[in-house]
Amino acid sequence: MKRLLPTSTAGSLPKPSWLAQPETLWSPWKLQDQELIEGKQDALRLALHEQQLADIDIVSDGEQTRQHFVTTFIEHLDGVDFEKRETVRIRNRYDASVPTVVGAVARQKPVFVEDAKFLRKQTDRPIKWALPGPMTMIDTLYDNHYKSREKLAWEFAKILNQEAKELEAAGVDIIQFDEPAFNVFFDEVNEWGIATLERAIEGLKCETAVHICYGYGIKANTDWKKTLGSEWRQYEEAFPKLQTSNIDIISLECHNSHVPMDLLELIRGKKVMVGAIDVANHAIETPEEVANTLRKALQFVDAENLYPSTNCGMAPLPRHVARGKLNALSAGAEIVRREILGK
Ligand SMILES: [Zn+2]
């Protein structure tokens, strides 16, 4: 029988220092060629081991084989020139030098499928695999070909669907699309953002999730959060349409955020991965703090639909902090599980 309140992470975990510079996004690899391939696999094994030691129910690769959650996927596609860079504003928040779309985008071969097969072989637990969502992908590129955000998003949705179908065939149980851009471009989310996401999951039989957060704990994001006021109501914009979408699971940032919990009422009926771990600070939550966040969510999410999780990926954190937070997540979920079953 499936355990009540199954735990998982939003996705990434810190990489070992022999593989990449710790506590850094877009950290360069320290190995090359065959050594890099083996190093990534070893890191994946370690990330899995740490999740299993912490008794995380739905495990992932910890994103050990990718440098970044968006760019690594795009690097494998045709039509994007990584040498030709332009400065654009990402999520209306910070300027970054990004690659240019110079022709039709296409996927010649699978991107993560071999990695997913490798993870599948290492564990009997359900596995979740993260892909970037179409809107977040277009937001990290300069488009000199389609010259339409919507058109490019539909192209990426088709490509993501190809990848997702092969991940499903490789034994992935939950395919998650990361869409932090859903918290920024509300009109586009409702006009075509959710529609392109549904295109990306078309025909899948495995479960699907969308992760919508306020970003990694980097300075650009924490500065932005300071401007959002005392109540963060961004989720309110996308929730009504997500509630009626085909997406099974919605993964959210909740702990230490100013998101009013009652917004979760708008997605009643969906499974919700409730972020009960803050990834923007190094303080390890107590199990009781985790339990508190879960109890608040339980007012609006039925127990069988509640999936305790982290607010976002933990890639930029020191390893011992990430490990502590995994343990806190597990212990906090267990407190609430007992409360529910004891009733
Ligand atoms: Zn996130």
Image: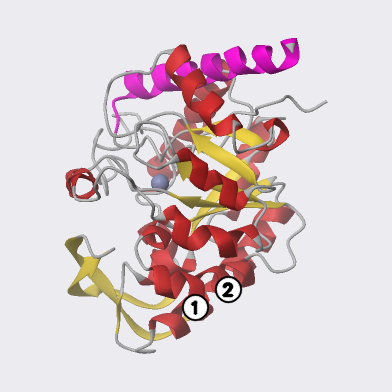
Secondary structure under tag 1 reads helix
Q: Is residue 285 above or below residue 125?
A: above
Q: Is residue 332 above or below residue 32?
A: above
Image quadrant in which the N terminus is located: top right
Judge left or right: residue 149 versus residue 226.
right
Task: Return the residue nearer the eye: 201 or 25.
Answer: 201
Q: Is mark 1 within 8 Å of ligand 1?
A: no
How crowded is the residue under tag 2: few (<14 C-alpha within 10 Å), some, or many (20+)? some
**Mark 1: few/some/many CA within 10 Å (<14, 14-19, 20+):** few
Residue wearing tag 1: 191
Quick check: marks 2 and 1 in contact, CB under 8 Å? yes
Q: Position of residue 162 (x, y in %)?
A: 63, 69
Q: Is residue 115 visible?
A: no
Give the SS element for disc 2: helix
Magenta stretch bounds: 317-342
CB at mark 2 closer than 8 A to ligand 1?
A: no
Q: In terms of depth relative to the viewer, which is nearer, 91 or 28?
A: 91
Determine the residue positioned at 41% across, 21% down: 325
**Vertically, is 10 above or below 1?**
below
Which quadrant holds the C terminus?
A: top right
Residue at the spot 52% in from the left edge and 29% down from the top edge: 296
152 is within the stretch colored magenta: no
At horizontal 43% and vertical 37% (from top left) the residue drawn is 254
Label 2 amino acid? Ala
Q: Which residue is mark 2?
A: 195
Q: Position of residue 142 (x, y in %)?
A: 28, 77
Q: Is residue 331 magenta?
A: yes
Residue at screen point 21% across, 60% down: 93
Could you tell whether 156 is left or right of 29 in the image? right
